[in-house]
Amino acid sequence: MLVSSFVAGVLILAGLAPQNLSACKLVAPIGAAYNATISDPFRQPRCDRCAGNRGIDYATQPGTPIVAGASGIVSYFGVVANKKYLVIRTAAGRRLTYGSISTSDLRIGDFVVAGQIIATTTTTLYFGVRESRGGNSAGAIATSDIYVDPAKYLAQNTDDLRHAVLISGIDSGSKSVDLDSSC
């Protein structure tokens, strides 16, 4: 069963299986048990290089655990403009970006499970979601990424998030949450 789930995930990442994009539910990046407020909400930029906020910024206490919003593979971990960033690519091709992180033991290629503690915060946390938009031109598939408001995925399951985050590993030691895997 585990092997077939892994193979299905690889097929989806390779674009060889249909994707259910409308059912995505993300675990909140910071558990309800921790105090975090939104310091800068999502603001869609007018163009690729225009000003805006391509995610949500949270004011946090340093060392607050950050949890994976969905299961996936770490596709980036590094420093941009003197801030550490970690990106998780999900089976449906979404990229969940966590920025201004303090510490993480994860590396590129590591598999994470929704709700798993992936890092800790500094005094802020950036959380963004990018989706791939594909187009077919003369037989070639062209894709581009677009930043979307993460709140639309968090708001869909507010009641589930409170329950899931509290059992996600932050307080109980568990490493996973049972969420829809189509993210």
Image (cartoon, rainbow, N blue to C red):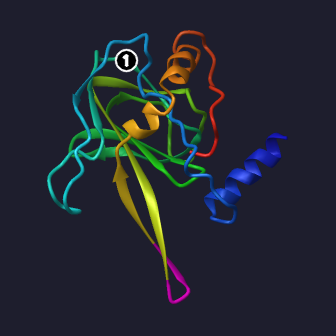
Magenta-highlighted stretch: main secondary structure? strand
Q: Quadrant of the N terminus?
A: top right
Please report the residue visible at 19 percent of the width from the left and 59 percent of the height from the top. 46
174 magenta-colored = no
Most extreme residue toward the bottom is 138
Q: Quadrant of residue 41?
A: top left
Q: Quadrant of the C terminus?
A: top right
Q: Work out whether 179 lies above or below 172.
A: below
Please report the residue visible at 60 percent of the width from the left and 50 percent of the height from the top. 91
Range shown magenta:
137-142
Q: Work out whether 26 lies above or below 92.
A: above
Judge from the rendering whether residue 136 lies leftward or rightward of residue 50; answer left or right: right
Q: Work out whether 143 lies above or below 78.
A: below
Nearer to us in this view, 179 or 6 = 179
Disc 1 element: loop
The percent coordinates of residue 55 (x first, y second) are: 30, 42
Q: Quadrant of residue 131?
A: bottom left
The percent coordinates of residue 25 (x first, y second) are: 53, 36
Most extreme residue toward the right is 1
The percent coordinates of residue 147 (x first, y second) are: 34, 52
Q: How many marks?
A: 1
Q: Which residue is mark 1?
A: 64
Nearer to us in this view, 4 or 158 = 158
Q: Inspect the image, locate mark 1, and give the three-letter code of the amino acid beneath it.
A: Thr
